[in-house]
Image: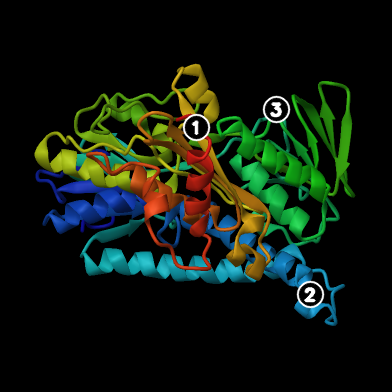
Amino acid sequence: MAKPTSATEPKSNIKTPEFQFDAIIIGTGPGGEGAAMNLSKRHKKVAVIERQQAVGGGCVHWGTIPSKALRHSVSRLIEFKANPLYRFSERSHRMRFSDILHHASDVIGKQANLRSSFYERNRIELFQGHASFVDRYTVKVTHQDGTFELLTAPIIVIATGSRPYRPKEIDFSHPRVFDSDTILSLKDDPQRVMIYGAGVIGCEYASIFKGLGAKVDLINTRERLLAFMDDEISDALSYHFWNSGIVIRHNEEFDHVETRDDCVILHLRSGKKVKADCLLFANGRTGNTDDLNLAAVGLKADGRGQLKVNQNYQTDVDNVYAVGDVIGYPSLASAAFDQGRIAADAILRGACDEKLIIDIPTGIYTIPEMSSVGKTEQQLTAAKIPYEVGRAQFKHLARAQITGTEVGSLKILFHAETKEILGVHCFGERASEIIHIGQAIMEQKNGGNNVEYFVNTTFNYPTMAEAYRVAALNGLNRLCE
């Protein structure tokens, strides 16, 4: 480790004649972890830099893990209230947002400790502080007390993630205005919540707050919810939201936000005014690159703070790599880990033939969940690919009837001639788990990807997996022989 240097000491007095590490990773989210672990296991001396007090990045502390933990707690609460076994119990108790945060905090702590042990076990040196470039081989780590130290390595990987987009005209310092990071600090129990932005994050939090009994206004800047999903699946979510009382306003743009002591009023360009106890602004994200001093290495991020990389995750500066949300699509924690792992292979070999899988599964943790892999009906129709559809309604499955999770369905799209599975789409509880059965078969080669697999395979009974057999039979019965 380099000796800590006073922040006032001239840089000219600091000399780093030799590299201290084989690689420096900036950020300990999924992308940084994937790169660090792979390099370390190949006997490279690795340093990671994390500006927060614990490792895990936004994924563990503000994004994926907290929101899914919150969602789980609310989902169980909904099931409890709907379960006839408890009809004589006290049913009027309403949990507050702060109540369910306890479970999320517990999970966050467990995840951070677990991931910290990974770095220790692999003898990866962790530096806590803010990272910024000095030159293409040198990173300055500024500590909280103002001191800093310089780290050097021939390879540097940027895995700094992203943060919620904050328009300058909105006062996010107001106690009633939140983004998807700061919403975790909500202490009050809002009766009416307004969410601007109906993407994945907006829809997930709409489910959470509605499950807690709040009135929810969901402002969508587009024509439909989650338009990248199969139309039937996104329509199912829209109907479920409508049926639960969530007010969805499509094709709206905000003009300005009026903040008061007792409420927030969103003024829309259409002339409408929406009043609520608090506003969650969840419309877009920005890459965390603005304070890395990229100019020192000749790099420049785009307007969304994202970096351009090649197929090996190499930036325009050949010894600097970037992975995860900071490079944009697909902006998934699962994909970021794989990007870090693949980038490490490219660093070690000079190039890497391995790529992310083409059909990356999508999991959206609304209540109920949505998940998808492969092509949608709209994509297949536009491409003029002859396909057939097999459907299974959860309400017909014994396991769903037993557990009381009858809302939802599974849809399999397969080629009408070869019977190759082209896409799988699911709406309902455990959809993000159920989808992986279809994904596994889709990845089979040499004719193994065939919808008839589900007919010729014996499933445990009763299970949700049985939906694949039901859907396969349903679709095969539609074929014109």
For residue 84, the mark is 2
| Residue located at (76% from left, 50% from top) | 175
Instruction: Judge whether 96 appears above or below 9 on screen.
Output: below
Describe the element under mark 3 as helix, strand or loop. Answer: loop
For residue 409, the mark is none
Give the amino acid type for the residue marked by disc 3 in the picture. Thr
Front residue of 237/29: it is 237
Residue 429 percent across, percent down from the top left: 60, 57
Q: Mark 1 points at which residue?
A: 388
2 or 1: tag closer to the N-terminus: 2
Q: Which of marks 3 and 1 is in front?
A: 1
| CA distance separating discs 3 and 1 | 33 Å
- 205 relative to 371 in the view: left or right: right
Number of residues whose C-alpha sits closer than 10 Å to that of mark 3, classed few (under 14), some (14–19) or many (20 or more): some
Describe the element under mark 1 as helix, strand or loop. Answer: strand
Residue 280 percent across, percent down from the top left: 71, 44
Q: In which quarter of the image is residue 252?
A: top right
Number of residues whose C-alpha sits closer than 10 Å to that of mark 1, classed few (under 14), some (14–19) or many (20 or more): many
| Residue located at (68% from left, 26% from top) | 222
Front residue of 9/155: it is 155
Describe the element under mark 2 as helix, strand or loop. Answer: helix
Q: Quadrant of the C terminus?
A: top left
Residue 114 percent across, percent down from the top left: 38, 69
Give the amino acid type for the residue marked by disc 2 in the picture. Pro
Q: Is residue 5 visible?
A: no
Q: Quadrant of residue 135?
A: top left
Residue 130 percent across, percent down from the top left: 40, 48
Q: Can residue 321 be seen in this view?
A: yes
| CA distance separating discs 3 and 2 | 39 Å
Q: In which quarter of the image is the N terminus?
A: bottom left
Q: How many marks?
A: 3
